């Protein structure tokens, strides 16, 4: 593999895709929050309708999909090469100080992948009308899919909520190391700004996780 | 003090190895770790057994020859020192000390605790030098260099090529070593001339030799006896990206 891509090239692509996926998380989160900050599901349904029909978003969806594929495939290759690089391990577990979540990027990554697959089936394929059926609702006189009702129904199921919360926590761990790691991989290191990037990375991971988590909790307990 | 030692013994590169238990008695707290191994070896030789092979040379922390993965850490429990600078006062009486060779595919065991680190030499041969004619020794200050750059280059040049970074890294990545070597040149005008080719050649060689990929765990920095900073890795990534794009 190293004949085609150097290790550094792989890391540069991984980090670009990782940062790109983070911007997607922010957009996704803002739409989800419409569900809890608005008394009805109209705003959310309207946003879902927009995301599902706007041609620019449709194109962007494929770019996003490609981003996931690149990030995941490179992540797997990287990890396999790294296992191969130490065929015989140590008897005493290494206790060197290191970035804690960096040790578990492949594990958190695989769990995120499983979550994404479930998420994809539950929401994306349903929204596209490939499986299941979604009730229609009227927003401003237009008939749109009632995605809000679908989400609320799922978030009333305790096991679904618990699984969702765990998956998000894992995503938070991935982001906690990933954010600053991406900057380091891209060579964006500076004595003045790097401490800020590190601090912001932790903050970002916590905010994204807590905000995403608040949605099923509010729906389950309050709505 | 008395100690129990668990030492990796492997008669030759292709032989199977195993851990062997030894006891050492009445070791002075002021003895160095390598002196403690010397004492063990003297006893083994007196008994007609094969002494434990381990690398060492200067025994003053400057050559990078000594190695050893001691109780889960390269160069033992202290930070920012080599094994030859480690002293027995860092251990408790009666403690069990497990001593292993560096483990990485490109660092095969030669015998017991000695590993072949010529992979590092091969990376240097791929570009870790200046091949342009730089003329005779110039007058001091004839070439203006920012103080910051001079300091950073000097810090990077402190790397002694010991391989602790590879040994500590969960991916057996050599990025800290390679980035120190890339940085010490890239920061200075004489080194800048060939900087683009250098970084690409050295990274390519590092990959071919089978070192792992960097996942920014930063264990290397924590274990480096010369406190080489991971900012060198960022600099190398940047140099590499710029070299590829231009
Ligand atoms: C929303 C989803 C995801 C986001 C935002 C994300 C973000 C990131 C970021 C920013 C990095 C650091 C990149 C670098 O330092 O070069 C990273 C690393 C990594 N990601 Fe993801 N990731 C996501 C999903 C996944 C998935 C599904 C996998 C599946 C296997 C995965 C596997 C990995 C691995 C193995 C690494 C470690 C690579 C390294 O540190 O070199 N990620 N991720
Ligand atoms: S970077 Fe540090 S740990 Fe790695 S070879 Fe150089 S001196 Fe040894
Ligand atoms: S023997 Fe030279 S650095 Fe330890």
Image: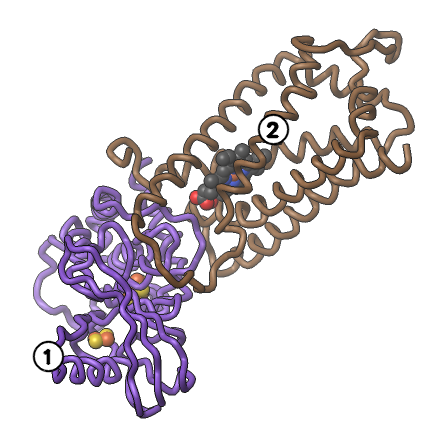
Chain colours: A brown, B purple
Left or right of B138, for residue B220: right
Picture residue at 55% right of the left edge, 42% below the top: A108
Mark 1, residues whose alpha carbon is within 10 Å: few (<14), some, or many (≥20)? few
At horizontal 53% and vertical 38% (from top left) the residue drawn is A109
Query: Which chain does the numbered disc 2 sit on?
Result: A
Residue of label 2: A116
Dot 2 crowding, Cα within 10 Å, few <14, some 14–19, many 20+: few
Q: Position of residue B217 (x, y in %)?
A: 45, 54
Position of residue B98 measured from the top left corner of the image (x, y, whole percent): 34, 70
Disc 1 + disc 2, Cβ < 8 Å? no
The quarter of the rendered structure image containing the C terminus of chain A is top right
Left or right? Give the position of B32 relative to A58: left
Q: Where residue B81 is drawn, which disc sits there?
A: none
Tally of numbered tags: 2
Query: What residue is at 37 percent from the left and 69 percent from the top?
Result: B227
Q: Mark 1 sits on what residue? A: B48
Left or right of residue A187, residue A168 in this image: right
Residue B145 in view of the camera: no
Question: Could one spot residue A39 in this view of the protein?
Answer: yes
Nearest the camera: A100 or B20? B20
Position in image of residue A194 (x %, y %): 52, 56
Q: Please name whichever residue, B67 or B16, is drawn nearer the observer in this view of the structure.
A: B16
State yes or no: Cβ of the residue under disc 2 lies below 8 Å from any atom of ligand 1: yes
Residue B70: name its quadrant.
bottom left
Question: Within the image, what quadrant is residue B117 found in?
Answer: bottom left
Nearer to us of marks 1 and 2 is: 1
**Nearer to the camera, B200 or B177:** B177
Quarter of the figure with residue B140: bottom left
Q: Nearer the viewer, residue B39 or A174?
A: B39
Q: What percent of the width, then of the height, locates residue B36?
A: 26, 83
């Amino acid at each position: 593999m190293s004949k085609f891509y150097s290790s550094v090239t792989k890391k540069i692509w991984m980090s670009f895709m990782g940062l790109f996926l983070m911007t997607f998380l922010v957009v996704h989160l803002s739409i989800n929050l419409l569900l809890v900050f608005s008394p009805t599901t109209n705003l959310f349904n309207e946003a879902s309708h927009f995301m599902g029909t706007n041609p620019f978003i449709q194109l962007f969806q494929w770019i996003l999909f490609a981003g996931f594929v690149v990030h995941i495939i490179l992540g797997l290759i990287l990890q396999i090469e790294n296992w191969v690089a130490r065929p015989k391990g140590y008897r005493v577990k290494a206790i060197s100080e290191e970035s804690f979540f960096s040790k578990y990027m492949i594990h958190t990554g695989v769990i995120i992948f499983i979550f994404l697959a479930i998420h994809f089936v539950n929401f994306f394929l349903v929204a596209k009308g490939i499986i299941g059926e979604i009730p229609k609702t009227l927003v401003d006189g237009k008939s749109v899919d009632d995605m809000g009702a679908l989400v609320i129904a799922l978030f009333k199921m305790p096991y679904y909520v618990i699984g969702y919360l765990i998956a998000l926590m894992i995503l938070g761990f991935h982001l906690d190391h990933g954010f600053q790691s991406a900057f380091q991989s891209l060579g964006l290191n500076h004595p003045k700004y790097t401490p800020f990037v590190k601090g912001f990375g932790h903050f970002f991971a916590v905010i994204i996780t807590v905000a995403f988590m608040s949605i099923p909790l509010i729906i389950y307990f309050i709505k | 003090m008395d100690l129990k030692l668990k030492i990796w013994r492997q008669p030759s590169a292709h032989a199977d190895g195993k851990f062997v238990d030894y006891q050492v008695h009445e070791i002075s707290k002021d003895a160095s770790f390598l002196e403690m191994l010397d004492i063990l070896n003297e006893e083994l030789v007196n008994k007609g057994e094969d002494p434990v092979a381990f690398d060492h040379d200067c025994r003053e922390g400057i050559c990078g020859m000594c190695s050893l993965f001691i109780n889960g850490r390269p160069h033992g429990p202290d930070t920012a020192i080599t094994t030859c600078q480690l002293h027995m006062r860092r251990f408790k009486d009666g403690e069990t000390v497990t001593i292993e060779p560096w483990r990485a595919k490109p660092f095969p065991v030669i015998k017991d605790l000695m590993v072949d680190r010529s992979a590092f030499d091969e990376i240097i041969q791929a570009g870790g030098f200046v091949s342009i004619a730089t003329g005779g020794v110039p007058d001091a200050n004839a070439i203006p260099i920012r103080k910051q750059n001079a300091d950073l280059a000097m810090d990077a040049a402190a790397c002694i090529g010991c391989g602790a970074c590879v040994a500590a890294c969960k991916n057996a990545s050599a990025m800290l070593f390679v980035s120190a070597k890339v940085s010490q040149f890239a920061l200075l005008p004489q080194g800048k001339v060939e900087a683009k080719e250098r970084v690409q050649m050295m990274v390519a060689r590092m990959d071919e030799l089978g070192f792992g990929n960097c996942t920014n765990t930063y264990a290397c920095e924590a274990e480096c006896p010369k406190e080489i900073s991971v900012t060198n890795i960022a600099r190398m990534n940047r140099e590499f990206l710029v070299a590829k794009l231009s």
